[in-house]
């Protein structure tokens, strides 16, 4: 009997995924990149599965690292975002399907055989799930013995921003509460090792650390701030917040003005801490 899981409530509307397009392997998978040369030296035809690829900017940049013979299979649960990811890959000069391909998949029920991929990668996926341990077990199943599982998750209580505008403090509280109301996880970064061990992995097979995002340059502030304003004015965050009594129309407009002020200040900075792990799958 198939277990019913909470859907990805936030969805893939541009108001949610716009700032995801800022992400690349360099700024969002730095813990994985040092492992790729060794993996490619032993297997130039390496197969990497990217779960929850979204608009595909990380997937495409990972595929660039696997050229000429490696392959990325990028997956997500929505056809529209997969089509956007495919267009992005083509715009980066990648060949579809030779270098990278796209497929609709649920992380809970991957359609692949056991031990099929050399590397399984997921970025900011587990935090949106009501059962992250079940998802990790499925990733382990499709990874080859000796292969790698690469995970990175934000910890929503490890944010810091300047200036500390009251409206942005309200926004952060709303974002955490909506995440929890959607069935997601607000402490994913710090719980990664625990989830993986609960999935049956020995601690000695886990390489753990923390990495950061910094939004301080004008272009970075613009990408983040505009996306947050869009979420507040048109996204699921607005709808769920109001319907659940977590916020009001007036507060939402106050938060949007706060992000606009933050974007325009030259001294504004946002730092986010992400938990990172590399798991080496033990031989059977």
Image (cartoon, grey):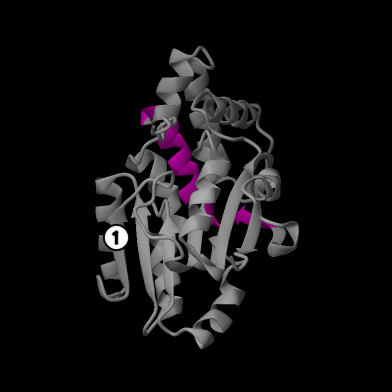
Q: Quadrant of residue 227?
A: top left
Q: Position of residue 197 (x, y in %)?
A: 68, 49
Number of numbered discs on residues: 1
Look at the image and tell me in which quarter the C terminus lies.
bottom right
Residue carrying label 1: 102
Q: Residues within 10 Å of mark 1 (few under 14, many from 20)?
A: many
Residue drawn 47% across the image and 84% down it: 43
Residue drawn 29% across the image and 53% down it: 82
Left or right: residue 204 compared with residue 36: right
Q: Residue furthest front?
A: 284
Residue 130 lies in magenta, yes or no?
no
Q: Nearer the viewer, residue 223 or 35?
A: 35
Q: Nearer the viewer, residue 269 or 37?
A: 37
Q: In the rendered structure, which segment of residues is drawn in magenta?
A: 210-234
Q: Nearer the viewer, residue 154 or 46?
A: 46
Position above or below: 52 against 178: below
Look at the image and tell me in which quarter the N terminus lies.
top left
Residue 222 visible, this angle: no
Q: Quadrant of residue 156?
A: top right
Q: Residue furthest bottom?
A: 41
Residue drawn 61% across the image and 32% down it: 172
Q: Position of residue 87 (x, y in %)?
A: 25, 61
Q: Position of residue 163 (x, y in %)?
A: 68, 40
Q: Position of residue 35 (x, y in %)?
A: 59, 75
Q: Helix or strand or loop: what does disc 1 sit on?
A: strand
Position above or below: 36 against 120: below
Left or right: residue 108 compared with residue 279: left
Residue 165 visible, this angle: yes
Residue 229 lies in magenta, yes or no?
yes
């Amino acid at each position: 009997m198939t277990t019913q899981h909470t859907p990805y409530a936030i969805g893939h509307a541009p108001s949610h995924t716009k700032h995801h397009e800022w992400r690349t392997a360099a700024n969002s998978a730095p813990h994985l990149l040092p492992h790729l040369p060794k993996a490619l030296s032993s297997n130039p035809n390496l197969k990497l599965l990217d779960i929850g690829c979204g608009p595909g900017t990380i997937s495409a940049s990972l595929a660039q690292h696997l050229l000429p013979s490696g392959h990325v299979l990028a997956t997500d649960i929505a056809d529209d975002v997969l089509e956007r990811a495919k267009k992005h890959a083509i715009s980066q000069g990648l060949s579809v399907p030779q270098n990278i391909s796209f497929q609709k998949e649920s992380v809970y029920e991957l359609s692949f055989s056991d031990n099929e991929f050399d590397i399984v990668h997921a970025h900011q996926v587990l935090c949106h799930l009501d059962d992250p341990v079940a998802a990790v077990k499925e990733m382990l199943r499709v990874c080859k013995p000796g292969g790698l599982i690469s995970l990175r998750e934000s910890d929503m209580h490890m944010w810091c921003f300047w200036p500390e505008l009251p409206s942005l403090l309200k926004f952060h509280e709303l974002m955490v509460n909506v995440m929890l109301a959607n069935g997601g996880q607000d402490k994913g970064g710090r719980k990664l090792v625990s989830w993986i061990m609960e999935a049956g992995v020995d601690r000695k097979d886990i390489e753990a650390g923390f990495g950061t995002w910094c939004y301080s340059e004008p272009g970075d502030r613009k990408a983040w701030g505009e996306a947050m304003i869009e979420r507040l004015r048109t996204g699921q965050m607005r709808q769920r917040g109001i319907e659940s009594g977590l916020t009001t129309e007036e507060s939402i407009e106050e938060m949007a003005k706060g992000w606009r002020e933050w974007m325009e200040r030259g001294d504004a900075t946002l730092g986010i801490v992400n938990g990172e792990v590399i798991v080496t799958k033990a031989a059977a």
